[in-house]
Amino acid sequence: MDIHELLNKVKNGEMEIDAAEKLLKQLPYEDLGFAKLDHHRKLRSGFEEVVYCSGKSTEHLVRIFQSFNEKSLNVLGTRATREQFNAIKAVIPEAKYDELSRIIKIVRSETEKIGCIAVCTGGTSDIPVAEEAAQAADFFGSNVMRVYDVGVAGIHRLLSKIDEINRANCIIAVAGMEGALPSVIAGMVDKPVIAVPTSVGYGSNFAGLSALLTMLNSCAEGISVVNIDNGFGAGYLGTQINRLAVGKNE
Amino acid sequence: MDIHELLNKVKNGEMEIDAAEKLLKQLPYEDLGFAKLDHHRKLRSGFEEVVYCSGKSTEHLVRIFQSFNEKSLNVLGTRATREQFNAIKAVIPEAKYDELSRIIKIVRSETEKIGCIAVCTGGTSDIPVAEEAAQAADFFGSNVMRVYDVGVAGIHRLLSKIDEINRANCIIAVAGMEGALPSVIAGMVDKPVIAVPTSVGYGSNFAGLSALLTMLNSCAEGISVVNIDNGFGAGYLGTQINRLAVGKNE
Amino acid sequence: MDIHELLNKVKNGEMEIDAAEKLLKQLPYEDLGFAKLDHHRKLRSGFEEVVYCSGKSTEHLVRIFQSFNEKSLNVLGTRATREQFNAIKAVIPEAKYDELSRIIKIVRSETEKIGCIAVCTGGTSDIPVAEEAAQAADFFGSNVMRVYDVGVAGIHRLLSKIDEINRANCIIAVAGMEGALPSVIAGMVDKPVIAVPTSVGYGSNFAGLSALLTMLNSCAEGISVVNIDNGFGAGYLGTQINRLAVGKNE
Amino acid sequence: MDIHELLNKVKNGEMEIDAAEKLLKQLPYEDLGFAKLDHHRKLRSGFEEVVYCSGKSTEHLVRIFQSFNEKSLNVLGTRATREQFNAIKAVIPEAKYDELSRIIKIVRSETEKIGCIAVCTGGTSDIPVAEEAAQAADFFGSNVMRVYDVGVAGIHRLLSKIDEINRANCIIAVAGMEGALPSVIAGMVDKPVIAVPTSVGYGSNFAGLSALLTMLNSCAEGISVVNIDNGFGAGYLGTQINRLAVGKNE
Amino acid sequence: MDIHELLNKVKNGEMEIDAAEKLLKQLPYEDLGFAKLDHHRKLRSGFEEVVYCSGKSTEHLVRIFQSFNEKSLNVLGTRATREQFNAIKAVIPEAKYDELSRIIKIVRSETEKIGCIAVCTGGTSDIPVAEEAAQAADFFGSNVMRVYDVGVAGIHRLLSKIDEINRANCIIAVAGMEGALPSVIAGMVDKPVIAVPTSVGYGSNFAGLSALLTMLNSCAEGISVVNIDNGFGAGYLGTQINRLAVGKNE
Amino acid sequence: MDIHELLNKVKNGEMEIDAAEKLLKQLPYEDLGFAKLDHHRKLRSGFEEVVYCSGKSTEHLVRIFQSFNEKSLNVLGTRATREQFNAIKAVIPEAKYDELSRIIKIVRSETEKIGCIAVCTGGTSDIPVAEEAAQAADFFGSNVMRVYDVGVAGIHRLLSKIDEINRANCIIAVAGMEGALPSVIAGMVDKPVIAVPTSVGYGSNFAGLSALLTMLNSCAEGISVVNIDNGFGAGYLGTQINRLAVGKNE
Amino acid sequence: MDIHELLNKVKNGEMEIDAAEKLLKQLPYEDLGFAKLDHHRKLRSGFEEVVYCSGKSTEHLVRIFQSFNEKSLNVLGTRATREQFNAIKAVIPEAKYDELSRIIKIVRSETEKIGCIAVCTGGTSDIPVAEEAAQAADFFGSNVMRVYDVGVAGIHRLLSKIDEINRANCIIAVAGMEGALPSVIAGMVDKPVIAVPTSVGYGSNFAGLSALLTMLNSCAEGISVVNIDNGFGAGYLGTQINRLAVGKNE
Amino acid sequence: MDIHELLNKVKNGEMEIDAAEKLLKQLPYEDLGFAKLDHHRKLRSGFEEVVYCSGKSTEHLVRIFQSFNEKSLNVLGTRATREQFNAIKAVIPEAKYDELSRIIKIVRSETEKIGCIAVCTGGTSDIPVAEEAAQAADFFGSNVMRVYDVGVAGIHRLLSKIDEINRANCIIAVAGMEGALPSVIAGMVDKPVIAVPTSVGYGSNFAGLSALLTMLNSCAEGISVVNIDNGFGAGYLGTQINRLAVGKNE
């Protein structure tokens, strides 16, 4: 039952105003005691369920996944360890795990893939973060073009791919160390660039701070930045933009 | 002459391959000695000319504006002082200045306004940055909805506007101090949110660092961040997304 | 005059007991050589004994607990490992351990519970810190209302609980990542809000710095902040305020 | 009209449910175009109106003060310059200004003073911040005891005042440089201590960061911290606690 | 008299061992009381005299310049204000001042120019720092090729110049904001790149920290970095390398 | 028992003078309302009076100086502006001001000079901080040897002075920029070295942070560090050590 | 086939312009799917192949080494673990590993050693980083002079070696803790000094930040800095300078 | 043979001037290839040998200890692991290890203990650092008074010990968390206070930064600071001051 149905019922006298008011005020969620699961999320945002696994106890995590599973929803788990996955797989055999991106996926119904997002990396060490972005975007229904290891220290590699990249609706540019990739790409394309700094590097890299600052201070236009190593956030946002571009956001 | 014309001429023998290759390799720009102006920018990106005025000498600035002016281009100057504006106005009387956003505009031909971008602020002190975003977006051809002073310390003000905000194609959320506005908005809408931290605040605000970190660490999905006080960058990026949404990006 | 002289004078009738008591109230403690235990603390502050276990050697820790135990005092151990607890339990079988909050409790005489403190968290990963606050508050004699997983990314969950929260005498708001929860709560209640940033997050979270700065820069009134992950400190302070509110502080 | 009246009217049929729902949802405020003033604030929180003047244009500021003034409300302006005050005084002659704390006050009806808050400073340079706290607390109806220049470098000065300080319902401890005052006070009293770091100092003080970190890391219990130089926030929070202690919060 | 002469005199008995030992131990310099001027510097390093003017009192500065002037040495003054220059010019009329780079020059004997150093900038706002580098290099005897405003946001501008740049013996790459220029250049040339971060930018640029970290973390080889805005240091070091390359360092 | 009671008892013979003196030694000070002046300081510490002038209002400052002056005490004012000095001189004509170190001195009775402290600087720009140290040490009764401009970039200048320096009882080493002077000195002498970082420098110097960290991380033994630019603190501490060395500390 | 051959073929009609243009645009590299290997690198830069091993999966790493190996190229692997080496050795038995510098080397054809680079360290703990520099420089064809453990805390050790050091074409100065070594060396030699901060130290060393800032702020001329612990970068750059000095760079 | 002997021999013709000059210039040390051991250190400074063990390979460490051992010198090893100790003990059975302070001692000839140093700590967790200070001071010949667990949160514990503390020649004050102990002690004694911040704490303690800044910004006079956790440095410096005080420094 969505909000319009509910309001119709109120109009038609099928529901008490008090009850309706209470329902509307809270937007329904299920209370597991320790976590408030929001099953209306997909209805409101058009996005599937996501669980941030890092730091959650295995017991809690399994219960969260089971709760979604009972409603036959697609679920994406991010930053999961193999141990967490094993525990989930024991109760939900359909669960899949990707070692590189540390993503757990339970796909009950395939989503149609639309539009295109380009996911680029500066080096090979940035690939785990890029894969988190790419697989999240794919999960939410975007076609994904992967263009890896095209960092600015050998600019010719990027130049040979740039026309292809610019055909995507938006670009996710993932880079560690000095993090200059998004600037260089944004100077050559006319699509939004989502910059993802990674913690790849050492010394004055300060676990990604260097790349983060580079991206925030870019003098190229059309760049915005997400948290260090936040591939998931970039994949989600990229899909929002991709949907707008293909006119699927209504 | 755009790139397709050029390649046609090569095909038809109207241009030597060498000359064509050289032109393509460099993409034409005009060299003022101290600054390389890129008159092909609009052709490539579909965006007008922009000049970052801060720190440029008045003499240099006037010559840059004149060079664009001679080509009858629309020009936007950001972070301009009134003194800089006065010098430009002396030679280009059509130039306009907005004290609040510190923007100089020279509009030769009106751009048709399309779609919609919502520009929101947490407080009244964030308005100068928000206006930079709003006026840049307007200059580049986006309709702009202003929703100011709806910060999270009085959440009811934001709640009463949220449906209206969600009708925009993307949201620019401008906030200083603790900078929580983008998180709260992103939790209630299903459109991309461009977060702009401002340097409004004192003490441990550290000139906007507090709001910047808040926005980068948001646990709401669909947020990306630009530099502190970078209203212009948000207006530019917002317009890119808005154009994609109304299908004008081809 | 040193303490022995003073006590001799009391014995010999050269000093009134009242005068001696006053002098002693300010000074006496037991010296274990490596740690100065202050058994008069409860008398002075009305609070039970607390031991910060982190970084203490097991041998020292056991001797500290034993010393309190011999006086039949209630004792709370914070930030204890299971190994530390096992060693203590071996000599004090009544000791209890809570894995989540890492608290050791030895309760000799139950404290009457008074008033009410609301302990809220932004997410489920903040629960260990919240439990440290809640269990410390409970140990010191406050009734505790737990309201977990009501973070600002889904503001409707918080809105549905806000009236209940405002019935407490003070609110402990625990949040990691962007840490916006205390701001939003303080904008809707009229009670003191003790903000507890947690180290939950990654990347530019910088181990809780992001949430800490957010809370310090809140534009809502009625907020103060304790150290990152300092649930205990919040529980102690919350109890002080709760006692004032029920008039028990005399 | 407060919320109870409103709900009574609904019950008695004097108001349509729709109208009531809309009113309740938004909580009424007046829209000046650039600022959303919240005249219901006093009703909800029991606190008077406050305007943060820093960074606001004089024109906007005068309109905000006039709007409150027309409703005959008491208003407190913080961080005001003398120029801002002069412009306000020109239209509201009753306005008063305190140079030291940079506070503007318009008092239409005197508030009865209750309970007691002790405001202490480490040095004489911390007095402006302390006065902001003291005058805000006074404005909101708290009795204030000032204990200035009792810093830890000459601990005997503090020791001689400590019994007096402990008679207050809560203590606001203001200190710059190393900021150790709140720790020392909290070790000797059994009331909540609100620690206010100031930006007094130089070099590695980093504009108050040193004192801020000291206070957050205090090993004394019963301390919480507000932003650097945030005297107002401490005065507001102190009054909340003071009201709870005298039972006036219902 | 140089060190070999001195040792010969000792061998020949023309100088006492004690006196010789003392002279050798100290290396001669002139003591002005407040500053130790080192007139042997040119002999030892082959570089002319340099005075860092910033923060020196005008009186001291004039005396330092006069002392060098009396020995008819070439002198370079860096970070000089026009006021400082005026005072020096009053007593040394041959002194010249360059407003952009804030350099004072007194050239008694022209140095032959050798080899070549390329000085590149990302934007026009970086030119003052670049000019400090270029003019210092010129003063010390290097030919200088200026390639300004070739930042990475419009990479085609740089690509069209890259062959020319690679003909220099070393490259000084000056950039603010995200500071990616040195990485991109180093990826395309095979000469040492001296990276100079500038303080051009705002917000999370943190006065050049962003560009500094970018350059230190470059994944291109052949880059080293000097202090923020340290054009002089780059010009000096560039000349050392240039001299080595033309075989003039013996 | 308060001070009046105590003094009455002495008067009435109820308390020995010795006992009363001891009690009084720990407590008495004069209360100006805004500042607690401690006239017994000299008795307790053997050091004269010191006033930190920075940030104090002229009115307060004059009253503080007058209060000391009435007791005919020697007074040292640090970080004073010329304006502050002029106001003090108007009422205390004997006051002297030193522009370089920004010190105000009122010397009623000359202190005998004992022992020796060496005050060294890396460059000429560090002299103001060094002079604050030197003049404070002189004021408190130490002989001072000044060795300025002996920074590590020209190590021979330092080597020629090192024997002389090592004859002092302790060394104050003042340096900005990279701040390596104290390390090099401590490696060559066997006396305590008090390191004073200065804020001289630019860019990644971060207002003295660079020199501060250098000094804290010195691998030479016998170094300790005071705050950035804290010449006074070094002069005070140096005198304490100097007094110990000449056996004057009893 | 190098670029000149290719252009000759175009001139002679042996290759289509389209094919040539495409080849030139991309500069040939081999695409392993996850990594773009650039086999033309040696041709362009005159330097051998280098692989940054840290963080790469063993499987990927082995494939990268094999790909180079099949072309019989010399390869240097940096920051390799023994586990990574073992896997590579299993398929390429000629691979050698150096535990101290964590370098893997595969040398197919010996490079002639030219010129000289001095590699100096402050302490013995800096040797691993120094060895990375020395072995990289050796691998690329430079003679290397090692001068270890000559830190500034015992300056006489350095003084006795300084003439020898100055005979090198450039100096790599490696130091942790306070990092003063490069300053002191640069003050005594007239060759470029490449400063390498190491993460050796503790506390306020902040993992090498202290040494990094020291080196960036050096008041000695002729210093530039690479990233913390970046021995490889220093060895590469040192070789570039060394080659220029011996005239081998054409 | 010390320097005076050597100069006598020169005077008496027992040594050639050349040989003497060479010896004097270098100050003799033994070169182990990887480490330059300075056996003259004791002669020059009057302090025994010290080896910083952290990060040194066991093989290197054993050879360093053996080299000293062969000269029958007393040696102190700091920051040693038990593994390092075991390896040393295997070849030098007289070696002793203290687990708490991680110090290795080899004492060949007992040093007479002189004067007194007080070593105080804020809490029990600071004891390992304090013991490093105390044992180093003892090793170098100072009497040590230990006053542990007297932190400012319970100021009465410190007050009862203060007279005793002030009888020492200097005070080493060791504290983590907020680090206020040195300020409070320095306000009550008239001897130099060496402040040692420790890394004890969590959250915004930032591994000792909080305590470090507190100590650097102390408003009490007579304080200087060493690196975080640098107990050894404090013990060494304290002994230098203690020796000056007892007149043993000649």
Image (cartoon, coloured by chain):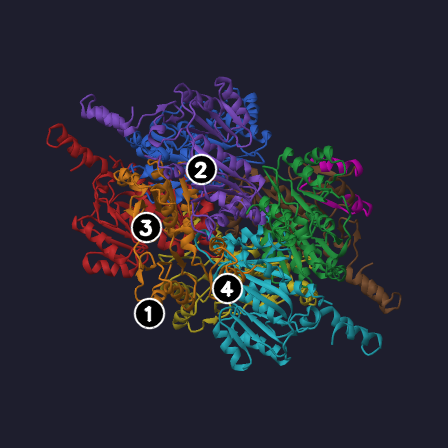
Chain colours: A red, B blue, C orange, D purple, E brown, F green, G yellow, H cyan
Q: Which three-letter amino acid code belongs to the residue tagged 3?
A: Gly
Where is mark 3, residue-wise? C141
| Residue H91 on image: x %, y % | 54, 82
Spatial CA span between label 4 and label 1: 26 Å
Viewer-closest of B245 and D166: D166
Where is mark 1, residue-wise? C90
Viewer-closest of H10 and G112: H10
Which label number is shown at residue A75? none
Q: Which three-letter amino acid code belongs to the residue tagged 4?
A: Ile
Q: Taking C108 as reference, is D216 above or below it?
A: above
Where is mark 4, residue-wise? H127
Magenta residues span E64-92
- Within 10 angstroms of label 1, few (less than 14), some, or many (20 or more) residues? few
State the SS at label 1: helix
Q: Quadrant of residue A19?
A: top left
Q: Chain of mark 2?
A: D
User: Can residue B2 be seen in this snapshot?
Assistant: no
Q: Chain of mark 1?
A: C
| Residue A197 on image: x %, y % | 41, 49
Of labels 1 and 2, the one closer to you: 2
User: Can residue E65 be seen in this snapshot?
Assistant: yes
